[in-house]
Amino acid sequence: MPARRNTRPDWVRARQIALGKRIADLRRAAELSQEQLGNLAGVERRTVQRYENAVTDPRYADLLLIAHALRVRVTDLLKAG
């Protein structure tokens, strides 16, 4: 995979972190473990952990499945601040 020509702006990283925190907060509010959310969304527990820690960005399909599992809209996951 070729390297990025430009680094991402700081606000992008801030949004990634906010998304991960929102996923974690909503998961806890739903009283689900990372393993349980992963099973409901069809991803590995480690993948949920990476999303919550903003190590990797979720694919759009995964966002749809996570939102469905948490019983929220995708826009609730992506809303700013």
Image (cartoon, rainbow, N blue to C red):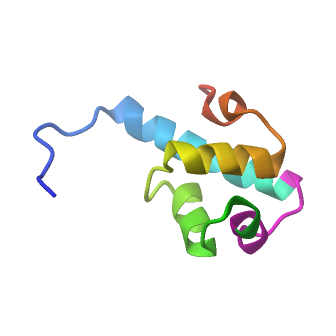
Q: What x and y, as percent, mark residue 59?
A: 49, 48
- The C terminus - image quarter: top right
Q: What x and y, as percent, mark residue 74?
A: 67, 34
Is 16 colored magenta in this rendering? no
Left or right position of 61 against 29? left
The residue drawn where x is 27% and y is 37% is: 8
The residue drawn where x is 72% and y is 44% is: 67
Q: Between residues 7 and 66, which one lies in front from this camera angle?
A: 66
Image height of 47 relative to 29, above or below: below
- The image quadrant that residue 5 belongs to is top left
Image height of 72 relative to 49, above or below: above
Image height of 72 relative to 52, above or below: above
Q: Between residues 73 and 21, which one lies in front from this camera angle?
A: 73
The residue drawn where x is 57% and y is 40% is: 18
Q: What x and y, as percent, mark residue 46?
A: 56, 73
Left or right position of 3 against 51? left
Left or right position of 63 against 36? left
Q: Which residues are magenta?
A: 29-38
